[in-house]
Image (spheres, rainbow, N blue to C red):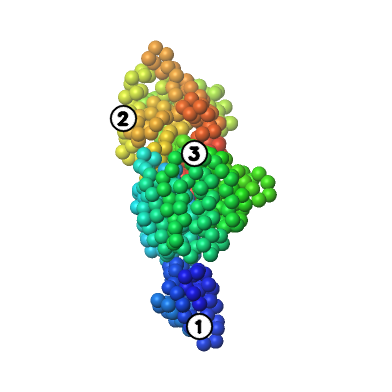
Amino acid sequence: MPGDVSSQYVTALMLIAPLIRDGLSLGLSTDLVSRPYVEITKAVMRSFGAIDVHIAHRHVTVAESGYRATRYEVEPDASSASYPLAAAAIVGGAVRVRGLGRNSLQGDAVFCDVLEQMGCLVTTGPSDIVVMRRRDTPLRGIDINMSHISDLVPTLAVVATQATTPTRITGVGFIREKESDRLGDLAAELAKLGAAVTVEPDGLLVAPSDLLHGARLDTHHDHRLAMSFGLLGLVVDGIEIVDPWCGEQELARLLGCTRRNAGETHVTYRPRTIVAAFDVDGTVTDRDCVVPFMRIVTGARRIAPRLAARPDRLVSALARRDRDQIKALAAQAAFRNRRDDDLGALGAQFARAVHDGWLRNDTVEALRGHQAVGDQVVLVSASFEVYVRPLGELLGVDDVLATRLEHANGVATGALDGLNCRGPEKVRRLHDWVDCKFGGRSNVRVVAYGDSAGDRELLADADEVHWMTSDGSAP
């Protein structure tokens, strides 16, 4: 049988071969394409007991052996992972795929190396891949033979439309016989957007073109085209995809697609500014900071008598377990009649101590990742601004939204501006900040980080949620 039509015919026969009497001897009349997919099949078969499998240039042999049950960990699908990795390349940002690393069996895992050639930064560990592109670093075109990673041609062609120099893809003439004509159909649909794509005998040439425009794109009942076209919704307004539900729906949801009627969808996702909002206590730091700061300001012996002077309100607040009222009473006891410049100096000193000793590594890594790609980063905290703002300056964040101490004539009154800077108040302040800076939420995607029940409202309001608990689950 021919080996240059599709490796799927070869792998299908290989999979049943251990159950065939006397096994299988398969001769190939042409060179084998997409060999990595055949090697994956061989590796999986061996894990299930079919160890006598041999792949030569134009010959595959499999002995009769049967299969045996085993425990097998399935890697993430490298072909499907190409879409979020491509999204990082197209828009700018960072994507991590866990479970897929340098030890992967899958040939398509090398797609991250292709993106690296185009200008992305790539980190590949034993069991994960991170692809990142700074938004001020343009993509550049490449010349590449994709005969061994042919399923990724539509993905790369879409990425290539955003490059500043031409991209030539070769070695893939055989993909005309896939679920669709993945050269002709792909080029025809991209041309509807204004992309400059030329079909060549064994591949495509994608040249830089002026600004792309919206268009109605047909998937030709090919899920690879549907997924790749979905990526265009990240950078081009007005993309309409006919029949995107032909096998892959999760990316459509990720990109913000909305189904209009049977068999159609309209991609409404627009490129948006990313705002990463981080809670402080327990999220950026690995402990609560409020009480230690109060102790520094007042001394442990001074705050208790001041609280005891308000027995009715304190007992009532404790009985109701009203944390906000307790915090307000404690703030009055701690900060009343303290000079603003004294508090400022203490806040800066405390922030330095927190920065040097209390930061949470995984959160700071996420924060630095957002900063590295140019996202807006804000601290949204119920803690006191007097030390959260200096901490934010040390971390280099864009702004701080925290509980402020009211003052008069350079002296703190002890009252708090925004008593309940917990759930709803955090959301309100973040909305006000986004409205002021970006003119509304419609062009902003909020990514929120929190660790406790006090952060539920903030995270519930976000477009993307990260619980910074030990297992990543909501407390």
Q: Position of residue 45 (x, y in %)?
A: 48, 75
Question: Residue flagged by tag 2: what amino acid is it?
Answer: Gln
- Left or right: 317 as drawn, with respect to 283: right
- The residue at 38%/33% (across/down) is 397
Q: Earlier in the sequence, mark 2 or mark 1?
A: 1
The secondary element bearing badge 3 is classed as loop
- Left or right: 75 as drawn, with respect to 256: left
Q: Nearer the viewer, mark 2 or mark 3?
A: 3
Q: Position of residue 194 (x, y in %)?
A: 49, 44
Q: Which mark is residue 349?
A: 2
Q: In this figure, which residue is indicated by the disc labeled 3?
A: 271
Asked whether residue 425 appears in the rendered view, the answer is no
Q: Position of residue 373 (x, y in %)?
A: 39, 41
Q: Earlier in the sequence, mark 2 or mark 3?
A: 3
Q: Residue furthest right?
A: 262
Question: Residue flagged by tag 3: what amino acid is it?
Answer: Pro
- Left or right: 228 as drawn, with respect to 89: right
Looking at this view, is 161 or 110 the one in front?
A: 161
- The residue at 62%/46% (across/down) is 265
Based on the displayed image, in which of its 4 quarters is residue 296 positioned? top left
Question: Residue flagged by tag 1: what amino acid is it?
Answer: Leu
Tell me: residue 117, above or below residue 352.
below
- The residue at 33%/37% (across/down) is 355
Q: Earlier in the sequence, mark 1 or mark 3?
A: 1
> What separation in Å lies between label 2 and label 3 (alpha carbons)?
40 Å
The secondary element bearing badge 2 is classed as helix
Q: In this figure, which residue is indicated by the disc labeled 1?
A: 24
